[in-house]
Amino acid sequence: MADPARAARMAQRIKVVVAQALGKIIKDPRVENITITDARVTNDLQHATLYYTVFGDEAAKADAAEALNSARGAIRKEVGRNLTARLTPTVEFVADEIPVNASHLEEVLREARAKDAEVAELAKRAKYAGDADPYKKPADADDLDDHADEDVTEYDGDEDADKN
């Protein structure tokens, strides 16, 4: 079993070899708009998965997938010719959905920014339903001194006189 670092290096090499093969060796016009975005190789170096994107509509994507599957043998032959590995890995092509997901995420973020701006505009024009500050505040020290004088009764010191 190979180490993951070797598998990563091999994946990058396979990515370059396949991209060059699509441009020079494969003569199918359906592969002209294909971009190889990523490659992954298993740790045992037996299987390579290549991720690709296609510029165009759904019909162009379907044609590109068909062209890649039909050219899989020639691409594997070219990979084996350019690698220094004992065994040539099998090649599998997977459509890369990251650009589609990224554009969807950008659309969602754009809508969120628009709603945030709308809420901020409403907040600028908002008025208080009651007082501006509805919370009770502690009384000032001066107010406490004024009220303290009113509540205190003077004591003359004669407790027995109060009882009779």
Image (tube, rainbow, N blue to C red):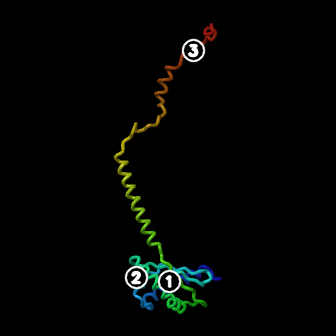
Quarter where residue 115 is shown: bottom left
Are the residues at dot 3 and dot 2 in contact (C-beta closer than 8 Å)? Answer: no
Residue 126's spot in the image, x, y percent?
Answer: 36, 45
Q: Earlier in the sequence, mark 1 or mark 2?
A: 1
Residue 118's spot in the image, x, y percent?
Answer: 36, 53
- Distance from disc 1 to disc 2, alpha carbons, whole Å, reads 16 Å
Determine which residue is flagged by label 1: 15
Quarter where residue 132 is shown: top left
Residue 50's spot in the image, x, y percent?
Answer: 51, 81
Query: Which-is-in-front pick, marks 1 and 2?
Result: 2
Sort mark 3 into few (<14), some (14-19) or many (20+) by Cα contacts within 10 Å: few
Determine which residue is flagged by label 3: 155
Determine which residue is flagged by label 2: 33
Give the secondary structure at mark 3.
Answer: loop
The residue shown at (44%, 37%) is 134
Query: Which-is-in-front pick, marks 3 and 1?
Result: 1
